[in-house]
Amino acid sequence: MTLTGVDVAEHNSAESCWVIVHGKAYDVTEFLPEHPGGMKIILKYAGKDATDEFDPIHPPDTLDKFLDKSKHLGPVDMSTVKVEQKKESPEEKTRQEMIALKPPLSQCYNLLDFEAVAKRVMKKTAWAYYSSAADDEITMRENHAAFQRIWFRPKILVDVEKVDFSTTMLGTKVDMPFYVTATALGKLGHPEGEVLLTRASKKHNVVQMIPTLASCSFDEIMDAAEGDQVQWLQLYVNKDREITKRIVQHAEKRGCKALFITFTDEGSNVQNGEETDNSQGAARAISSFIDPALSWKDIPWFQGITKMPILLKGVQRVEDVLKAIEAGVQGVVLSNHGGRQLEFARSAIEVLAETMPVLKQMGLEDKIEIYVDGGVRRGTDILKALCMGAKGVGIGRPFLYAMSAYGPEGVDRAMALLRDELEMNMRLIGCTSVAELNPSLIDVRSLTSHGNGVPTDVLSKSVYDRLQSPAQRPKPKL
């Protein structure tokens, strides 16, 4: 039976709440208290078409997976659904003007340029989610600033006519020593979401890490891959281990080449531009399924359900790297989750500086692959990490900004710019291959001192969206 808009509109309260998504009606009444984003956002669309609100946040298979089939009410005759005329707000009018006036893509010369443009053209709530981090955002800014305390010691009179910065990651040959790391909610920035990043990764022959909290479904992202393109899975572990097992084994069956288990707290400590019922930010809300009881004792269980290489993402101290080696995993990602978790967590590059000398002293540097993410914005940042012993680096937000500002062409140019920077700076430090990068080429003495003699990063400073104190109320009119 086909429902009408009038049928659905009658169910517009917490006592009986129906919504329309992609021309089908769903009874979400019983789900209201369980919705990670709170009841308020669903009730806003009770009895109405919620498709526009649903799409940027949820993979298309969400309702099929998580809402009992008895609550799937069937198709709706959309010609009978009242179309609400959305009045363009002054804010949206200004944003559209900024989109029309945005600089040509050719004027973006580095990754921070994309961030500057994205700040002006993205919707306020989307920008708030992509750009924000925990508490005072000190850790997020330190992730980038830490790279600026590392200096090069370049070699001269080296034949650098031919430069090769290809490498291998977990046995996969890649053209550049970075991967597209997992970031949530890609459709907030572009309607195609993560599949756009899949296509760019293929073009530039780099690995894409598929996020648990993607806007596109896992299968959509896998289906967008071409040929022998390599993808990894980033996994937030569900409290229900059977669900986790199904996800992991399905990923392996579909051809994922590695499993990155992400150790984090329950949800994310992230600010957000839109209120939710639990007042804890969008990321904490959408990731509330994450198991806070996850521990070292669970690693053997994962090793028993998959043959994929297992890596631990979110390691922040050398002692845990040693535990990872002892546990028999294939790698770790040194990461503080982009500054979205614990404020005053050290940057990954600083943890790398602590880790590699210990591993070398113990003869363990070849027992595990070390990756870092957070704050990488330049080709020089990548080279510094590799000189220190990292196998590669993960880059996330810059590609979201490029995608949000310029679509697929933006991501393509962002990766091409990194390629150009890598080539130029490999020549300038006197290296022709990744194998030649080593600690003698850098000076890290300032990295852990946290002194004040750090050059000001003008581009980063101008782009940074400063936190605001509560505004004073206007004086009442007499």
Image (cartoon, rainbow, N blue to C red):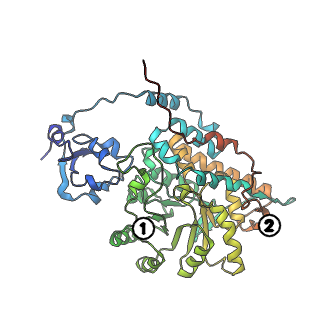
Q: Is residue 395 above or below residue 190?
A: below
From the image, tell me which residue sits under label 1.
Answer: 292
21 or 299: nearer the viewer: 299
Q: Are marks 2 and 1 in contact (CB under 8 Å)?
A: no
Q: Is residue 134 above or below residue 364?
A: above
User: Circle 1 — which element?
Assistant: loop
From the viewer's perspective, is 75 left or right of 54?
left
Looking at the image, the residue that sits furthest to the left is 1
From the viewer's perspective, is 23 left or right of 404?
left
Label tally: 2
276 or 182: nearer the viewer: 276
| Lower position in the chain sequence, tag 2 or tag 1 | 1
Amino acid type of the residue that numbered disc 2 sits on in the rendered structure: Ser
331 or 239: nearer the viewer: 239
From the viewer's perspective, is 51 left or right of 389?
left
From the image, tell me which residue sits under label 2.
Answer: 440
Classed neighbour count for the residue bearing mark 2: other residues with Cα under 10 Å, few (<14), some (14–19), many (≥20) = few
Instruction: Tell me if residue 225 can be seen.
Output: yes
User: Circle 2 — which element?
Assistant: helix
Q: Residue 114's spot in the image, x, y percent?
A: 59, 42
| Image quadrant where one finds the C terminus | top left
Q: Residue at x 58, y 41 (%)?
A: 466
